[in-house]
């Protein structure tokens, strides 16, 4: 199997690491001056590991939506780790509301899924951004900017300019999972690589770290479903 990889360089980085994203793309994170030939040799030595990651049966399964699942009364949608009943309301409602379940205006027609997506994004901004600021204070770090984005194949990101971003789909996950992803990205402001020190920082802040990682591994596909 032949695969391509992208190289992202950073002057702050001391070691080279390889990640396989959720879209199966391979990204090499390398120090600024590391020669491309050396990068190629390291990638070759990791070829088997990369193949295994690219073919992971759970992390990379394709689930655009549940089989036969539609946005109709009686179906359910995920929010903060729980499934809530959907009710399509025919009169007296012109926007998505949540009251122990999802109330979806029938007048939206084909825009119902888009409207639910916009509702999720609004809740993600409302709930995740304050968590980022609170965890940043506990860690003693300062994120330059916090964004809620449509990073379909990544739950979170941290740039060399200290900007952090989070996938709006995380709002479907339990809060302990959201906190894990938030701290994971913020910890990169203290330790660029996934070193033992990095994981100790995350584990100290999130005692349920391993449980959160397992939850994402087993349920990540559910977060990507339209409903």
Image: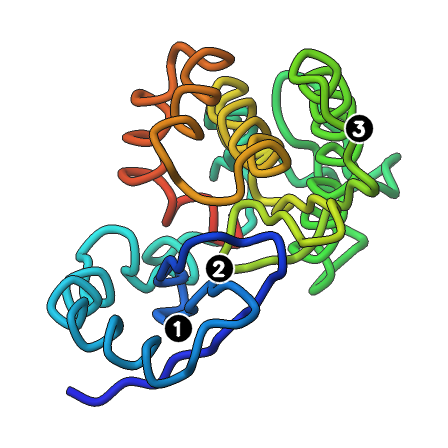
Report the residue marked by disc 2.
Answer: 153
In the picture, residue 125 is in which quadrant? top right
The residue at the point 49 percent across, 22 percent down is 174
Residue 105 seen by the camera: no
Say which of 14 and 129 sits in front.
14
Left or right position of 107 against 84? right
Q: How many marks?
A: 3
Number of other residues with Cα within 10 Å of mark 1, as a class: few under 14, some 14 to 19, many 20 or more: some
**Helix, strand or loop under label 1:** loop
Are circles 2 and 1 on residues that touch, CB within 8 Å?
A: yes
Say which of 115 and 173 sits in front.
173
Report the residue marked by disc 1.
Answer: 25
Number of other residues with Cα within 10 Å of mark 3, as a class: few under 14, some 14 to 19, many 20 or more: few
Q: Position of residue 169 (x, y in %)?
A: 57, 44
The residue at the point 56 percent across, 29 percent down is 79
Q: CA distance from mark 2 to mark 1?
A: 10 Å
């Amino acid at each position: 199997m032949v695969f391509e990889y992208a190289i992202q360089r950073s002057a702050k980085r001391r070691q080279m690491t390889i990640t396989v994203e959720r879209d199966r793309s391979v990204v090499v994170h390398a120090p600024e001056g590391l020669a491309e030939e050396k990068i190629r040799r390291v990638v070759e030595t990791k070829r088997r590991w990369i193949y295994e990651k690219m073919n992971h049966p759970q992390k990379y399964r394709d689930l655009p939506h549940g089989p036969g699942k539609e946005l109709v009364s009686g179906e359910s949608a995920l929010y903060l780790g729980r499934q809530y009943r959907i009710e399509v309301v025919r009169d007296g409602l012109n926007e998505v509301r949540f009251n122990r379940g999802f109330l979806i205006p029938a007048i939206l027609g084909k825009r119902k899924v888009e409207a639910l997506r916009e509702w999720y994004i609004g809740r993600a901004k409302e709930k995740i951004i304050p968590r980022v600021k609170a965890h940043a204070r506990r860690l003693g770090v300062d994120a330059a900017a916090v964004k809620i984005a449509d990073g379909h194949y990544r739950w979170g990101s941290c740039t060399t300019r200290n900007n952090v971003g989070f996938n709006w789909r995380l709002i479907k996950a339990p809060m302990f999972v959201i906190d894990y992803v938030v701290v994971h990205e913020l910890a990169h402001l203290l330790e660029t690589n996934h070193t033992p020190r990095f994981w100790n920082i995350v584990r100290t802040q999130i005692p349920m770290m391993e449980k959160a990682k397992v939850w994402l591994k087993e349920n990540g596909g559910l977060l990507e479903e339209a409903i």
